[in-house]
Structures are given as structure tokens and as C-alpha cells.
Image (spheres, grey):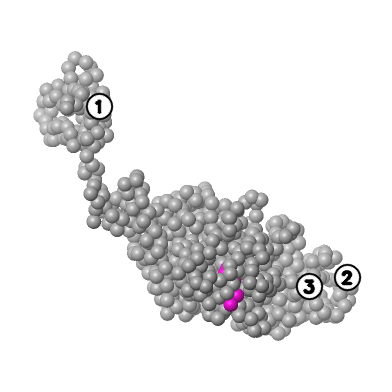
Amino acid sequence: MSKFSAITGNGAIAEAMRQISPDVVAAFPITPSTQIIEDFAKFAADGKVDTELITVESEHSAMSACLGASVAGGRVMTATSANGLALMWEMLYVASGMRQPILVAVVNRALSAPINIHCDHNDSMGARDAGWIQIYAENNQEAYDNMLMAPVITEHADVRLPLMVCLDGFIISHSIETMQLEDDSKVKDFVGEHTAYHALLDTDNPSTWGSLDLHDYYIEHKKGQQVAMENVIPVVEEVSERFYQEFGRKYELFESYCLDDAERVVIAINSVAGELKEVIDEVRDAGEKVGLLKIRLFRPFPYAEIAAALKNCKIVTVLDRSTSMGAYGPLFVEICSALYDADPRPMLYSRTFGLGGRELLLNDIRDLFEESKRYLDEGKIEKRSYFLNVRGG
Amino acid sequence: MSKYFEVRWHGRGGQGTVTGAKSLAEAVQGTGKCVSAFPDYGPERRGAPVRAFNRFSDNRIRIHTPILAPNVVMIVDTTLIGTKSLVEGVGESTIFVVNTEKSAAETKSLLGLTTQTVHTVPANHISYRLFKREIPNSAMMGAFARACPEIISLDALIEESEKIFSHLLAAELVGKNVEAIRCGYNEVQTL
Amino acid sequence: MSDKYGLKDWQELPLGGVIPEGGNAADYETGTWRTWRPVWLKDGCIHCLTCWVFCPEGAYVLKDGKTPKGKDRKEIREINYYHCKGCGLCAKECPVNKKGKTEAIQFIREEI
């Protein structure tokens, strides 16, 4: 039976991993994702999973061990954050290039320096070009659900790419929230058996992995990767629909909240969507047409679908919880690309917030909606881009 | 008035304040409400002031922001009295639950409160009696049930705590924690 | 489909650059790299197989044979010039060549 529980985001991820019981988990724990591996190590020690847990000496080794185990033919997972993900960087590209369906729970945290352990999205956003699928979660329920869908998406024959399930550090990872945990056997049935692709341990059918690939073939392999990424969109839709049939919680490529008739739309990723929904309800009660488009799938980015969802809106505020220094935030850039061909094209501007865990309070969000109203009334955008809640303006 | 019932805990690193908020959330969750519990992580140093938060609601809780205007303030460490953050955002009807052996009247005046209700509970004393050391959480939870019966009754708190503790502790300690909850509930002074 | 050089389209490639079969080095013609050629001299050879051990391309081909006293052993049969890239390691390492009295492997310039 599925049951309601009060557990942390990290605990929810660890539960999902226990239920999936992967062949190998290789990890080097780092704040704020530590509890995932702590909990999972306990499951392994207590014999609740069949997993080979490999403790390694760095995140580079963690991803290397994951890669080796995946190529050997196993279903493989790990968890990390921030500087840990940064240390995996080299191997992230190798994992996606070698088309290994490795899963990583990324508990989003700011990258040093100055050193900071709190939430922002610079870690996973920095890895957005690494060829990994990225799915983001607003709360611990979504993080858990995404984790259950992840193996089905990554191991799909049209996909076979690694995947990051991203959730907000501390805000979600360390918060207890009421959520629904599904029955072990139902999860097992949903996730299904792992099918390996030319496993190295299949010694009857020997294969070579990691061979040299120069100008005669490299770009053909990259083209294959790009097409596999494009295939992710229908696969995510299909798997989410099957998840809905099985467990009753509906997910799409992105979440539309009060979006259909919205004139003023905010686009955001992860936990801040909760606060946005709260304020949208208030502003709607006052008769104003505001809405939220919450990103779920960031890689691949569903450009056409998002453009279609925004076709009736007049002004769009994009909230980035990460920066590309000297450029617009990564989410804003994608939304600009998505809306370039829109006719009429809505007004569009960018706000960066929450770096290193800086809170965005309900009043700040109320101010945001006031601002978008003023811009819309005046027909011009005063400031294209700035940091919210920063001293000195 | 927020649609959430909001609790803010004040304690010191190492005292189990965060665990207190989490245990209370799990117990209230067991009664069928939606809950959240989260800490306000700073540098994690033993003895440094820490805060933890709870929200309770009949509906899904969507927000994660720190609690600015609490319905209840739980003060786990009396030596914090005098720090401004205890009374930040406090309204006329905010309820205080304070771990102290001082009288409710004295505590109220130390906190500079007027219209607010203050519940005192000698949680450290109860803890020494039962565990021979200072782990005030269970007695604080008992006092919370006394202060906020609309969130959780004593009977429900005991029933849920037994379930939660039995996964974590030996039978003898489960019994002692239940006893601490009961004592915390019974030894509350209110003004 | 493949292009005029026989290279495959992206759709035909196994994923992730895997080579989904064993022993396919045999298909690779390294013989075209050769500008010098080792020539195996049957009469000088003592069948110690040092050349076979050192050859990076596996170009030395073995056969079953007997020692002068009649025991079973492997012997060199020939050099496979489809794979021999002319590196000369065999001639350099050959113990018969090293002694200097006779030669078992000559190393000579390729004639055009």
C-alpha cells in the first residue's frame, strides 16, 4: 500500500533508491546530499538492497566507478552536490558520450568561492551541456517520483542517456514534508528489469568500450547523442503518463499553474514554485490574470511546447537561481530562444535570485507581480535583468 | 492570518532542537494533517543558537520560507532569553512554550511579553529525572500538546510517538520518552 | 547507407562508440604503413618465438611442429604482410640476429 509519510527530500530519494535496488552505487558523500548515501548505506548494510555499494576517494572516482559498473552491465546510481558534481565533470561527458544510463541525484547547492553550502542551481546548470537529461523537482514528492521514473526514461531504447534528478539543497533535501511513498512491489513492477547494452561482463559476446573516435566518426556519434536527447521528450511524456496511470500523480514536460488565460507569467525552477503558487492564488483572488510555468525537463529543453504554452501571455518574468557571469541566466536564455519566433512575442525580462541560499519571501514575490503589472501597463521594460534581494540594489 | 499553523523553535546546536521539530512533525503527520519541518542551517556549531520550523495544515503545504510570524514559539534553551530573535515577528496572540523552572510570570516578564500566553515546562528537570541527562525534546512535545490541543492531543501524541520511537529506540527508552511527554504535559504552568 | 569511402551514417553506428565484437583488429590493414620489410629466413630460425612475442600486430603466423628430438612445439610459419607494418622490432629482438653469425630475420627497404 502506498502510505503518507513525513520525510526529508534526501530521505525520499534514498527510499526511491532502496525500492529500485540498483546493482551498483558508488559515492563520495557531500553536503547537502550526504543523507542520501548515509540512508542508502544503512539499507545496504541491513541487506534491504542487493546493491554493491562502493565508497570511493573522490567524486571523480565515484562517477568513474559508476561508469565502469554501467558499462559492465549494471543499473547504477549516485548522489552529489555542487563541488562534488564539479569534480565529476570530466566523467559526466564520458558517461553521456558512452550512452550509459547512469542516474545522479543532484542536490542543488552553490559553487564556491566564497564557500557556501546553501541552495542555488549553478552546479547542475553548469552541467547542462554535458549531455545529461535533467529533471527538476519542486518538493520531495516530485523528487521521489522523478527518481522512480528516471530508470525507465534513461534505459529506454531510444534514449540510453544518463540523467540528473535535481532538487533544492536544504530547502527540500533537509525539510520534512508530508508525501506519499509507493508500495515496494508496485515500484519494482513500474521500474522493471535493467537491460544492458553490450555489457562488458557478457564474455560470450566480447566488446570494446572507450575506443578512439576521430574526425571520421566522432561527429556521427555526437549526432546520435543529439537525436537520443530529442527522443527524450516523447519518452518523458510516455513514462509520465504511465506513472500517472499507475500512481495517480500527473507530470508533464513542465507544470502549468493558472497558465491558460494568464497575461503575466513567471517561469521558475524547483522549490520557489511553491511560493509562487501561493502568491498567484492571492493575486488571482484579486482578479489579476497571473500564472506560473514551472520547468521540469530542462535538458532536453522543450522549446516548441513552452512557446505554445506561452502563446496567450503578454509579459514573462524568468527567475534564474543561477548565473552565467557576464551573460543572462541559463533559463532566461532558453526562454528567449523558445519565444524568438512567437508572434506576437510577449515582453520578456530576467531576474536572478537566491544565490547561495538567499531567501525569496512571499512579499518579494508580491513585489515581482507588482513590477510585471507596471511594466505591462507602461508597455516597456525598465530593467531587463538584475539580482533580486541584493544589498546595494 | 496565514492558512498554515506555524511553529518556530529556538535552541542551541547539539541540543536536539531540529530533531524536536522533526519528531513533532512526524507525530502530527500521523494524525492525518499535512506537515513540514525544516531547520535554519547556519554554521553547525555546538552551542550556537539554532532555529527550526514547523508548519501544520489540513491542506498540502507549498511554501518553504522561514517563519516570520509564528503562532507558537518553542524556547528549548532558556539562556537564549534576551536575544532579540525570540520575539521577532511575534503577534498579540502568539503562544510561547518555554523550557524553564522559573514561574510563568517571571518568564513572561523576562521575555517582555504582554498579551501573549506563556507556558513554562521544566523540561530539563524532567529529562534529568528520567534519563539522567539533558534531552528536553519529549517533554517539550508534551508541553506543545498542552498548549495547542487543536494541533495534537496528548493521547494522539503518545500514540504516534510510540510508533516513531519504537523504530529508533529500545523498548525501555520508548517508555521513558512517553513518560517524558506525559510529564511535560502535566507540569506545564500557564499565564 | 555509407559514403564513397565506405564510412557509415550515424544511424548505423552502435551506441557510445562501442565495438560490439572481439578480434576485429584482424580486419585492420596495417600492412600499408610499411616502408621497411622483415623477411623471415627459415633456415636460420631456431623457433624461439621471440619475434612472435614482440610483434605488435600479431603478424607472425605459427604452426605445429617438432623439436629436433621429436617433442611437440609451435613453429613460425610465415609473416602476414597484411598486418606487418614494418616496425622492425622482430629483427631487432631476434636472438639469432643478435649473435651476429647468421640471420633469421632480414630487415630490408621495401622496393617499389
Instruction: Say if labels 2 and 3 share a chain.
Output: yes
Quarter of the C terminus of chain C within the rendering: top left
- Residue C72 falls in image quadrant: top left
Residue where numbered disc 2 is placed: B110
Q: Main secondary structure of the magenta part?
A: strand
Query: What amino acid does circle 3 point to?
Result: Gly
Answer whether residue B168 is visible to the viewer in this image.
no
Residue C85's x, y, as percent?
24, 33
Question: Which one is earlier in the sequence, the residue at label 2 or at label 3?
Answer: 3
| Secondary-structure class at tag 2 | helix
Instruction: Say if labels 1 and 3 share a chain.
Output: no
| Secondary-structure class at tag 3 | loop
Q: Chain letter of disc 3?
A: B
Q: Residue A184, relative to residue A102: is it above or below?
A: below
Closer to viewer: mark 2 or mark 1? 1
Q: Is residue A24 left or right of residue A265?
A: left
The span shown in magenta is A263-268
Quarter of the N terminus of chain C within the rendering: bottom left
Point 40% across, 73% down: residue: A238
Q: In front here: C97 or A358?
A: A358
Query: What amino acid does circle 2 point to?
Result: Leu
Quick check: is B138 in the magenta stretch? no
Residue B14's x, y, as percent?
71, 60
CA–CA distance in space, label 1 to label 3 = 86 Å
Residue where numbered disc 1 is placed: C88
Q: Tag on residue B89?
A: 3
